[in-house]
Amino acid sequence: MPKLPRRRSHSRNVQISLRRLHLLDKAVDHSNESSTESDDEEMKMNEDSFDMSKNYNDQVTLNDISDIFELCKNNSSYKFISVLLYMSLRHFKITWRDCDLFMKEIGALSSQTCQKWTDIFISGDFNQFCTDNRGGKHIDDFYEGFPDLELEAKLFAVERCRNKSADFTAWDLANFVDQKYYEITKITKDKNANFVRSIQSCRLDLRRWGFRFDSNTKRPYFEGHERPEIVTHRETLIKYFLEKKDHFYTISNDENPLWILPSKDSPSVLIFHDESTFRSGEVSPKRWLFNNNAPLFSKGRGRSVMISDYLVMHPSGPFLTLSDKEYQQALVLYPELADDVDDVTYVEKTATASIKVGYDSYFDNLTILAQFERLFKLLQFKSEFKHHNIEVIVDNATTHTAKPYSLSDFGKSIGTRCTTDTIEYVDSQGQLQTIDCFFKSGPNNGLSKGLLEISKELNVKLPPKVKLEQLREILANHPAFKVISRLEQLANKYNVKIHFLPKFHCELNPIEGVWCYQKQFIRKNTDQTYKQMLKLIPQSREIFTTRQVHLKLFRRFWRTLHAYSDGQTYEQVLKSFYGSFCSATVQSHRRITNTNL
């Protein structure tokens, strides 16, 4: 028989392929024959919506391919899909061995088996290829017969994913389901039997339940925002301010917020304090570019300046500044206000302070105390604050909460460590008592007394042979060791009340929004020089004041308090008030934005 012309041969092969596809269409059970054209349209992808520049290998893993293969296998013929995949790989010149490794990795048939069925499909009995001697792949939903087991499995996965360790795998879920299955059915498992639900199926279960296998570094971190002691502190603070809300200056809920004056006697001015670091090398994350003509920029973070400032909730202005007349009056009583301070630069007529990071000292407890004392002195001469109570909110950093001494600063015996010369406390009669911590005379002159000797002077009864840990527990309830922080002691001297925020709750401090606004402005306008940054910092404050952004920050503060009071959690509050970056569970300090003011 003469050889067919090339064109006729190609036409014949196409007709044979079409007939095979027609037979295959009859052999396969189509469970979705009722699909409409609209369903088909929904399946089409908009190619313009994909970024083709993305690296495919960075997005897809073998586990992802294995999961989609398992999903296809559960809805179609295991053999057909395996053979199709094998033939596709071989078409692109992938070696037989590489195909075999890949097929086994994703749970498909081996290359040897696929090659056998490929030969049958191409040159063998087509009906034999379409016949499944095992009766086909009949998938029954495993959890339909065990709905309680599915719930337990899901709860198990949720609990494991909440752990900080990243050791949870689909194998753990498969093992859990396997154990529970045999407990429920009371069947003895064969030692050689596989899991009753495969690892691949468990991976699909996790995806179906809403889990995802994602980068561990991109998740929001958790620092204990809902720990019992943190929640108690938060509830106490919120209750205090909401009960006294009528004593403070608040903001209306109108589209254009306005001041609401206190309706109670003895009005109060609320002041917020915080520190933040500005870096000259930081730039805006996005900008307009033309072609590839991007300007050169410095990769480093540049020189830094740390600013410690106050935000005032009062119609006189968001930043405390005395007039020339008020400042001159303050200098008469406190001439040291005009003195230059080593390492710290103060803005004239204010308590705003800055430190050059890396050149000057840091804002430690002593520096903070000096700044707050300057604030308390200036407040006395602010005419708008006359006959007002002053209350200040600070965060829970150790620079603010540091105490003059604590029980851990003392040793037990004579001559052991001691960090303070005297202990002052108010006794049950309201009298101020002072105890020396060092001997003034006698054989132990100049030595520290130790907790054992101090407890005798305090008339505290101790058990015989008491240990240091037990001694500290006993003295912890004595007024001599119930010490408030140095900052609170200083504030009491000037009749100012200090409030410490709960740990990890910077969202309760509106001045965080000030830093956000200032840094956004600076990053947009910087040329990455330190000199330019120092010019932009005061400019950003002026624009912040002119645009009255502080009104929205104060309004958000009260809304946040009410949200917590209504029972919302930290996570819910962030999602409600603090921008799209807070769409996950718990956010970090740097990610609070001013999006939802």
Image (cartoon, helix red, strand yellow):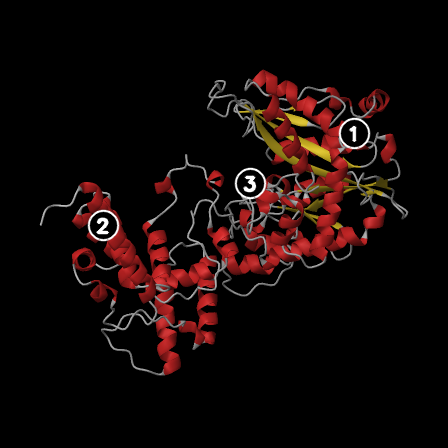
Badge 2 is on which residue?
12
82 and 365: which one is in front? 82
Describe residue 358's horizontal placement relative to residue 564 as left or right. left
Q: Is residue 452 above or below residue 536?
A: below
Q: Which mark is residue 225?
A: none
Quarter containing the C terminus = top right
Could you tell me which residue is drawn at 49 percent across and 40 percent down? 49
Q: Nearer the viewer, mark 2 or mark 3?
A: 2
Distance between mark 1 and mark 2 Cα atoms: 98 Å
Tell me if label 1 and label 2 are in contact, CB under 8 Å: no
Distance between mark 3 and mark 1 Cα atoms: 41 Å
In the rendered structure, which amino acid carries the disc numbered 2?
Arg
Q: Earlier in the sequence, mark 3 or mark 1?
A: 1
Residue 528 place in picture, x, y as percent: 54, 20
Tell me if label 2 and label 3 are in contact, CB under 8 Å: no
173 and 372: which one is in front? 173
Res 161 seen here: yes
Could you tell me which residue is drawn at 60 percent across and 44 percent down? 580
In the orientation shown, which residue stands out farthest toward the front? 1
In the rendered structure, which amino acid carries the disc numbered 3?
Gly
Q: Quadrant of residue 201?
A: bottom left
Describe residue 258's horizontal placement relative to residue 192 as left or right. right
**How busy is the neighbourhood of tag 3: few (under 14 within 10 Å), some, or many (20 plus)?**
few
Residue 326 place in picture, x, y as percent: 85, 24
**How busy is the neighbourhood of tag 1: few (under 14 within 10 Å), some, or many (20 plus)?**
many
Q: Which mark is residue 378?
A: 1
